[in-house]
Amino acid sequence: MLRLGQLAAAGRLLPAGPRLRPPRPAGGRLSLSRSWPPRPAGPVGDGGLLSRQVRAAAGEAGGGGRGPALKTPKGTRDHPPAHAALRDRLLAAVVACFKRHGAAAIDTPVLELRETLMGKYGEDAKLIYELQDQGGELLALRYDLTVPFARYLAMNKIANMKRYHVAKVYRRDNPATTRGRYREFYQCDFDIAGQFDPMIPDAECLKIVHEILSDLQLGDFLIKVNDRRILNGVFAVCGIPESKFITTCSTVDKLDKMPWEEVRSEMVGEKGLSPEAADHIGEYVQLHGGLDLIERLLQDPKLSQHKLAKEGLGDMKLLFEYLTLFGIAGKISFDLSLARGLDYYTGVIFEAVLLQQENDHVEESVSVGSVAGGGRYDGLVGMFDPKGRKVPCVGVSIGIERIFSILEQRVEASGEKVRTTETQVLVATPQKHLLAARLKLISELWDAGIKAEMLYKKDPKLLKQLQYCEDTGIPLAAIVGEQELTDGVVKLRDVATREEVDIPREKLVAEIRRRLEP
C-alpha cells in the first residue's frame, strides 16, 4: 500500500530544508563532534521540492546553451530519479494487489502486426502509431494491453488464465500532461480469461479497483458500471439502427466531458440521428443509481422486452449482490451514461473516477478524472482464433499515469523530498589512507545483502561523508578508523539521532539488520 504518510515514516520521503554546511571555527580548522552535522531548525533536504530534484537531475540549472533546444517528443517526458522512485513504489503497490488476487505476470512485444490492432478500437483507431514497412511486415505500436493479451491467448490456445501486465503503450493523442495524459504511458492491467459462472470474475475486478484506490488514499472515488447489452438495448428501443450502435456509443461516452446538449447536438448533427431518437436516448443515459434503478428498468415496458438488455439487467442485479457481499456496493453506481468507446466490450463495463466537493456549500461531488476502467470482452479472442473459438474475458486497467500525477502534485505541495535510493549504510572513514579498510568492509556488507555505499574518493573528509548521508536519507553510517581497526570494532552511527556505538566487527551485519527491521 502506498500511503504518503507511510512512505515518510519509512524514510522514503525526506522533508525539505536548507543544505547543511560545516561551521568553520577560528583558525580555519574544521572540528568534528557528535553534534555534527548540526541539528537544523527544520527538516533537512536537498533543495526541497520534487520539481527541484527534477531540475537538478535534468541539468537545467544553467542558462540557455548553443544550438537547438533539447526536448522530448510531444506527449512524452523523462523520469528523473525522484519521479522514477515515486512511480516504482506506486507500481509496486498496484502489482502487490494483483498478486494478492492470484494473477501471474506476462509480457508481450511493444510492436504488433498492424492487422492485429485495427478494427478493435472504434473511432480511437486513428490514434494508433503505425510504422513504415519493416521488412515485409506492416507494424504498429501497441495501443493498449488488452488486444495483445487476446492475441496471446489465441496464439497459444489458452482457455483459462488470470494475468497481470505492466508495460508502456502508445497513442497519437493530443496530450494533456497536467492531467496525466501522454502519448507514451504505463498501463497496469488485470484480466481473468475463461468460462466461469456469471459475474463472479467481474465482481472481483471491481473489488481490485476498490482495494487499490482505497490503499492509495487518493480521496473520495466512485466506480461507475454499465453493460453494453443494456446500452445496445437502449439504442434499439430508441429506434437507432444497429449499424450506428458503435458510433452512437462513442458519442454517449463523451457525457463525462460534455453536457448533454452538446452530446445531443453531435448525435443529430454528426451521427445522423433524428432529434426524437436523441431525446429518447437522453431519457435513459442520464439515469444513475443502484439496485432500485435496475429493478425499475427491469419493469420498463420497452427495455424489458429486449432480450440482450434483459440479460444485461439480470447480470447487473447479480453483480450488485456480489458487490454487496464484498462490502463495496456503496462505492458503485449503475450509470447508463457510461459507454467506453472501445469496440471489443460485450458486457459489463466500468470506470473509476475521483471526486471532489464542488464547494463548501454544495453536498454533491463532481468527477475530477478517470483513474481506472475496464469491462467484459467475450468475443475478442475469437477474432484471432482460426476457428473462431471464443474465450470469455473480463479485466481492468489502472490509470497509473493519472494517479502518479496526483501523487506528484501532493508531494510537491507538501514540500517533501522523495528518496531516490534504498541505501541502508554508508561506509565511512575519518582519517586518510584507509581506502583499503573501506573497500574491505563494504564488500563484507554487500556479500551479506546489505545495501551500502561509499564515496568514490581515496581520502574523503568525514564531514562530507556524513553530509552525504543527510542529503540522501541514508539511515546509518559504518565508520572505521585506525582505532576501530585496532580494536576490531566498527563505529555505527544513527544519522537521525547522531548516536554512535562501537559494534564488534563480526556482529555488525546482525546489528544493522536489527536496526533496520520494520
Image (cartoon, rainbow, N blue to C red):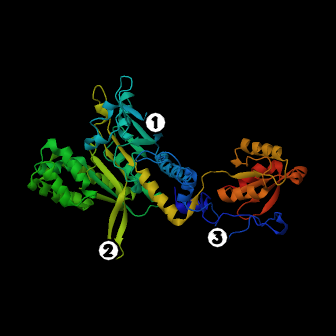
Q: Residue drawn at (47%, 39%), measured in percent from left and top?
A: 104
Q: How crowded is mark 3: few (under 14 residues within 10 Å), some or many (20 or more)?
A: few
Q: In this view, does 78 lie to the left or right of 196?
A: right
Depth order, front residue of 348/124: 124
Residue 96 location (% of width, % of height): 51, 48
Q: Can residue 153 be seen in this view?
A: yes
- Compute the Cα span from label 3 to label 1: 46 Å
Q: Is residue 411 left or right of residue 234?
A: right
Q: Residue 107 carries which label?
A: 1
Residue 124 location (% of width, % of height): 28, 43
**Image depth: mark 2 or mark 3 in front:** 3
Residue placed under numbered mark 2 in the picture: 362
Tag 2: residue type? Val
Q: Residue drawn at (25%, 58%), measured in percent from left and top?
A: 258
Q: Which mark is first along the chain, 1 or 2?
A: 1
Tag 1: residue type? Asp
- Compute the Cα span from label 2 to label 3: 38 Å
Residue placed under numbered mark 3 in the picture: 42
Depth order, front residue of 366/349: 366
- Compute the Cα span from label 2 to label 1: 46 Å
For mark 3, give the secondary structure: loop
Tag 3: residue type? Gly
For mark 2, give the secondary structure: strand
Q: Which mark is first along the chain, 1 or 3?
A: 3
Residue 206 location (% of width, % of height): 37, 52
